Image (spheres, rainbow, N blue to C red):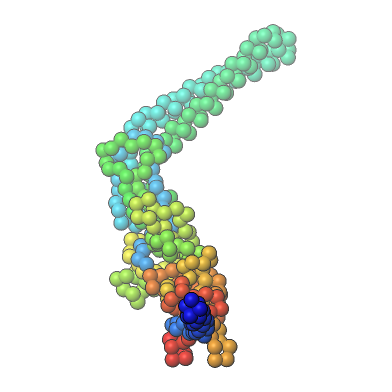
Amino acid sequence: MMVLRSIRCRLCLAAATAMLLVTACSKEEVKAPPPRSVRVVKIQLEEAGIGGHASGVIQSRYNAQVGFLVSGRLIERKADIGMVVKKGDVLAQIDPTDFKNKLTAAQSQVTSAQSEIAQAAPQEARLRKLLADGFTTQADYDKALRTLNVSQSDLQQANANLRLAQDQVKYTTLVADTDGAITQTGADPGQVVNAGQMIVQISQLDAREAVFALSERAITFASRIQVVHVALQSDPTVTTEGTIREISPTADPVTGTYTVKVALPEPPDAMRLGAVVTGSVDLKGDEVAVIPTSALLQSAKEPAVWIVTADGDKAAVHSRTVKVARFDPDTVTISDGLKDGDLVVTAGVNWLADGQQVALPGGSAQ
C-alpha cells in the first residue's frame, strides 16, 4: 500500500510539472504580430480643371410672333421661311372688304352728326339771344341747348367709330415692326385667322446667341463658367467668345437636359441662324487629390482614408476624414483633407486599426 501511494504521488507531481512546463512554453510563444504589409500611394495635389464641349445651334434672342389685330380670311402671305425683311415690309394681307364697309358706315355717321350740329347750334344761339331779351322761355332755351349737347356727343362718338374703322382697315395689312429673318409661319392663304394668331415669326439678326443642352452633371458647374469658346462646326476656324446669359431652372421632360443660352456680342456673319456650333470651356479650380476608389474607408460614418505616418524605422496608420468632390468609376477626387506627400493606404483598408503598425513594400510608396 505504501508503495502504491508513493507511485501515485510521483505521478501527480510529474503531471503538475508537465503542466507548468507547457504553460511556460505557451507564454514564451505569444509574440506581437508582425507589421501588416500595405500598399500606399503618395499624394500629389493638382489643380482641378473642368473642361468639355457640347454641340448647340445659333438662335435669335428675340423672336417676335407677328399676327393681325383683326380677324378675317387670309388672302396673301408674302413672307416665307428664310426671307430677310425690313421694318415696314408687307408680310400678309387679309380680305378688307367688310372693314371698308364699316369705314363707309362710320363716315356716314360723322356726316349725319355734323348735320345735326349745323342745325342745333344756330337754334341754340338764337334762343339764347331771345332769352336775354325776354322774348322766350327758359324751358325752350334748355330744350335747344340739350339738343345741341346731344348732337355734339353724337359727333364725338361718330368720330371715334371712324378712327376705329380706319385703324381696322389699316390692320388688314400686316407689316414687319422690326428687321429680321422669317423663321416660322403659322397660316396659309385661304385660312380664316383670328386676331392675335401667329402668321409669321421674325427673329432679329443682331441678337444671336448659341443654345446648348447640358446634362445634370454639367449644369452644376455652368454658373462658374466665365467664357465660352464657340466655333462653327462646319468650319472650326470661325470662332467667337460668349458668356452664359440664361440657365434653364428645369430639365426638359423628354431629354432630361438643361437649356443653356450663351450671348454672342459680336458673332461672325457665318454663324447664321440655325447654324450648328460647338461650345467649349476650360474652368480652373482648387487643388485636389485623386486616389483609387479602394483607398476610401467603407465602414466610416464620413469619408476617410488611412494615412501612414513614420516614427523612425516604424510606420503606423491613422484615419483621416476627407471631403469627396467627385466619384468616378475607378478613382475618387478629394477636395480637402490631404496634402502633398501624404501616404494613403490603397489596399486592405477595412482590415486595419487606428495606430496599427504597417510595413511598406520596398520601404517606399507604391
Residue 105's image quarter? top left
Task: Name which residue lies at 44% across and 25% down.
Answer: 108
The answer to whether any part of residue 273 appears in the image is yes
State whether residue 345 is above or below residue 102: below
Location of residue 202 in the rendering, given as x and y in whole percent from the top left corner: 38, 52
State whether residue 146 is above or below residue 315: above
Left or right of residue 93: residue 341 = right
Location of residue 81 in the rendering, given as x and y in whole percent from the top left corner: 30, 53
Task: Name which residue lies at 46% across and 87% down.
Answer: 360
Quarter in which the C terminus is drawn: bottom left
Tag count in the figure? 0
Residue located farthest toward the front when viewing the structure as drawn: 1
Nearer to me, 49 or 334: 334
Task: Name which residue lies at 33% across and 64% down.
Answer: 275
Task: Name which residue lies at 44% across and 27% down.
Answer: 106
State whether residue 9 is above or below residue 83: below
Location of residue 296 in the rendering, given as x and y in whole percent from the top left corner: 47, 72
Residue located farthest toward the left when viewing the structure as drawn: 190
Nearer to me, 262 or 23: 23
Location of residue 303 in the rendering, given as x and y in whole percent from the top left corner: 51, 68
State whether residue 318 is above or below residue 178: below
The answer to whether any part of residue 358 appears in the image is no
Nearer to me, 264 or 18: 18
